[in-house]
Image (cartoon, rainbow, N blue to C red):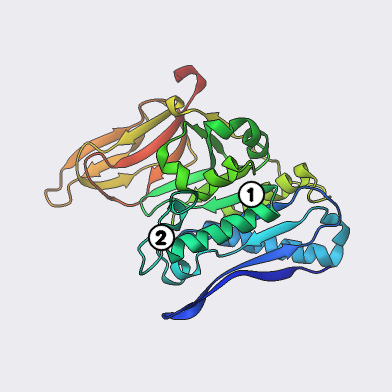
């Protein structure tokens, strides 16, 4: 049976096109795990759209050339917050709401909450595993990584290790997570990986391709796809806890001029960049690494204020 496109929500809007959530369903040939891919919760995050585009293309081709390879149902939600995507904003326009903070109990009734609840219900009814794609904000470039809340570590780590990311970052639980899609799906006992890569308003094709290959590897690992995994070697991700991450922050306001790139392995006291005062011409601060390790976050937006994050480094074992 060929791919089916379903509309799980359609609400008339006074602003023009209806508010809709579409999903592409690739039907299963057996009872292997049902895997769902979600992207576009934030309208300025585009990396996931590219990854889901590649997955959709690949699976459509597979239907034509090797349909028996799709053993478990695969659902792709390619643009769940169309209103924000059309205006390329993180928040839902007009409401100024972050839709990824409207999931779960205790929410005040609104169109955004109705939309997020419809998405949550549909994912719960049609998924055994969910992948939620995100990018960073306007300021920081992120290496492909999966962030896991410690309460869900046991179920998620085996899946995360198959996803071809560079880093797995395990966090303690915090109130801020409890209204997100990933937290509520995991609380409902549907293992959900939250993948973050890149920076908003950009597509980094090489890293998107890296995660695409990781998703094929994950689908093979779960038995959802009965295919040989990509020939590319799947990365062994670095795994860190919060105390194994060094944060570098600005001590002054100014312009940050970076001298490294995200993904580099650094030694202690290597130069990250400098903070300059463009008015006086003075160098305010030479920024050096406090430890050796993997540079997995780097500031891309030059304008900084005192306390602004400049970098995160996953410490080497000897410095943890």
Q: Judge whether residue 66 can be spotted in this image.
A: no
| 230 to 2, vertically: above or below | above
Give the residue pinned by disc 2.
90
Which residue shows up at 60% across the image and 56% down it?
121
Of tags 2 and 1, which is closer to the observer? 1
Q: Quadrant of the N terminus?
A: bottom right
**In the displayed structure, does residue 83 sit left or right of residue 221?**
left
Distance from label 2 to label 1 (Cα)?
A: 21 Å
Residue under the point 63% across and 30% down = 154
Q: What x and y, as percent, mark residue 223?
A: 80, 45
- Residue 262 position, x and y percent, is 46, 43
Foreground pick, 76 / 226: 76
The residue at the point 36 percent across, 33 percent down is: 247
Q: Mark 1: which secondary structure? A: strand
Q: Nearer the N terminus, badge 2 or badge 1?
A: 2
- Residue found at the far left of this picture: 280
Q: Is residue 14 left or right of residue 19?
A: left
Q: Which residue is mark 1?
A: 130
Element carrying mark 2: loop
């Amino acid at each position: 049976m060929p791919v089916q496109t379903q509309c799980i929500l359609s609400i008339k809007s006074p602003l023009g096109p209806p508010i809709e959530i579409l999903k592409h369903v690739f039907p299963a040939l057996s009872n292997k795990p049902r895997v769902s891919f979600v992207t576009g919760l934030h309208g300025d995050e585009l990396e996931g759209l590219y990854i889901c585009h590649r997955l959709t293309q690949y699976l459509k081709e597979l239907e034509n050339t090797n349909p028996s390879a799709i053993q478990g149902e695969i659902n792709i939600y390619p643009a769940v917050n169309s209103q924000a995507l059309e205006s390329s904003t993180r928040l839902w326009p007009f409401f100024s709401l972050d839709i990824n903070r409207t999931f779960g109990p205790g929410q005040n009734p609104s169109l955004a909450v109705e939309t997020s609840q419809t998405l949550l219900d549909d994912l719960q009814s049609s998924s055994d595993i969910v992948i939620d794609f995100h990018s960073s904000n306007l300021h920081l470039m992120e290496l492909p990584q999966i962030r896991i809340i410690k309460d869900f570590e046991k179920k998620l780590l085996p899946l995360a290790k198959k996803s071809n990311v560079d880093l797995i970052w395990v966090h303690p639980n915090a109130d801020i997570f409890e209204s997100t899609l990933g937290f509520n799906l995991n609380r409902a006992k549907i293992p959900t990986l939250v993948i973050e890569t890149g920076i908003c308003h950009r597509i980094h094709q090489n890293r998107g391709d890296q995660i695409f290959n990781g998703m094929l590897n994950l689908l093979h690992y779960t038995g959802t796809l009965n295919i040989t995994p990509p020939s590319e070697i799947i990365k062994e991700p670095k795994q860190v806890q919060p105390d194994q991450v060094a944060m570098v922050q600005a001590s002054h306001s100014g312009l940050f001029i970076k001298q490294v790139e995200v993904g580099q392995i650094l030694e202690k006291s290597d130069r990250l960049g400098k903070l300059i005062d463009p008015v006086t011409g003075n160098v305010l601060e030479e920024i050096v690494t406090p430890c050796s390790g993997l540079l997995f976050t780097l500031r891309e937006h030059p304008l900084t204020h005192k306390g602004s994050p400049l970098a995160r480094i996953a410490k080497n074992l000897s410095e943890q």
